[in-house]
Amino acid sequence: MAVSPFSPDDVRDDFVPKGDYYDPAFAAAEAENLWPKVWQIACRLEEIPKPGDYYTYEILTDSIIVVRTGAGDDDVKALHNACPHRGTLLTTGCGHAKQFVCPFHGWRFGLDGRNAKVVDRHDWGSCLKDEDIDLAPVQAGTWGGWVWINMDPECQPLDAFLEPMKSRCDKMEFEKLRFAWYKSTIVEANWKTVVEAFTEFYHVQTTHQQMLTYTKDYSTSRAMGRHGWMSYEFGTGLPIGRSARLEPLEQEPDFREYLYEYGKQFKNDLAAMQTERAFQSIQALRELPADASPVEVLTKWGEGIYQRAMESGAGWPEGLTPEYMAETGFDWHVFPNTVFLHPAIEAVLWYRMRPHGSDPEKCYFDTWSLERYPPGEEPEVKQEFNADWRDGNYPLIYTQDFENMPKVQKGLRSRGFKGARTSPVQERAIANFHRRLRSFLQDPHKDDDLGPEPKRDQP
């Protein structure tokens, strides 16, 4: 393996080299040392619910078959999607199979990848050994309802790779969520540019100004090993209340109004991170007096969501103490290319970014809205793909972000731009991402520090 020339020491908490976002040499280093050697989400288990169901995952020049081999959630295998005869793809998209059959020459393979038939095998005499004609295996694991794959046979175990995020989010029971909707598009920006758009809340005060009417938006972020953690600076509760960036009102509205606005915007402008049960619980807050304290309002709201979830049969995670919820934060970046936001417990917004072929200034962007449904009431959801996001009927908050990202990518190319000047407080996770990415490119098997960063003084 060639050693990457991109040193982690060139990244500071307040600086990221601009070439990382567009340099073909950097993209080539990722193609050689990142994507074939890192754990990444391939699909959700609900996309392959029955034995024999498969999903074809594409990442650059590699195609991977993810197949359910049994009834259990751990009965999943991943295989390189290339017939060992002449390399023909065996699958495209999603489907169901009892065997994988090469459409070119009819070689057959079991769901476990073992060869079941070579047409006229006698032609090869003793040249073909059994191990030569099986499909090449790929590491696979499950967590949070997702199937994760890694093409490196010497990779770190998935559970260890996901720490410390896994320990801080296990109790959220993401595996019990199901698709509410699933949209994919192409963004005219590097995959890291898009990751970063959802790895900080600093942009809310300008990009999503409408949210300031109910959001105390000042945020903080942390390095969590290779991963990143984002939440709000002022405490452990929801960031509900008017932003200090706005002019103070002559008379503050009662606290219920902030939740009304929160519910309305999440329902109309985000269409995620809020179930209908949660929205109904906001409407029920009218039963409280107008002078109810924020604690009383939030308590009533939380009790309403819990009660409706239990009565519906959707259930609720156990053991969610305020301390645990504070440590889960609001937003996680899981190295390298997935981000999820989960302040609502029963409704999570999840993103995945992947490079687009040989063009480092373009990427695929998947958005998954996940909710907790009563058993049997999950909607049937299929991926909606639009090459142009403008054709995707995305709600307002997404369109505001889509409009920014290509502008960022184009500006990175400016001769007058020296490099990203990330905030050491609100964008610390971004600098950590680039430092850890460069470290991974130099040695994918380095046992990175997986704990949270030490406490530090504010700059």
Image (tube, helix red, strand yellow):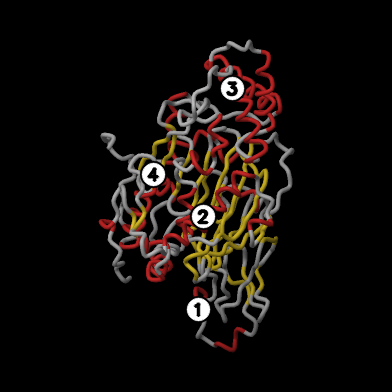
Q: Is residue 254 left or right of residue 158?
A: right
Element under disc 2: helix
Residue located beneath label 4 in the image: 427
Marked residue nearer the N-terminal end (4 or 2): 2
Marks 3/2: CA–CA distance? 35 Å
Quick one: label 4 or label 1, which is nearer the N terminus? 1
x, y percentage for residue 108? 64, 73
> Relative to 133, is 91 on the left or the right?
right
Point out which mark residue 302 bears: 3
Q: Which tag is nearer the camera, tag 3 or tag 1?
A: 3
Circle 3 or circle 2, nearest the eye: 2
Mark pair 3, 1: CA separation: 62 Å
The residue indicated by pointer 2 is: 405
- Depicted 65 relative to depicted 83: above or below: above
Q: Residues within 10 Å of mark 3 (few under 14, many from 20)?
A: some
Find out whether the residues at labels 4 and 2 contact each other: C-beta distance under 8 Å: no
Q: What is the CA distance from the residue labelled 4 to the residue labelled 1? A: 54 Å
Query: In this orientation, which residue lies closer to the viewer: 39 or 342?
Result: 342
User: Of 105 and 238, which appears nearest the observer?
Assistant: 238
Q: Amino acid at mark 3?
A: Gly
**What is the distance, in whole Å, between disc 4 and disc 2 at their CAs?**
16 Å
**In what element is the residue under mark 1?**
loop
Mark 4 or 2, which is nearer the eye?
A: 2
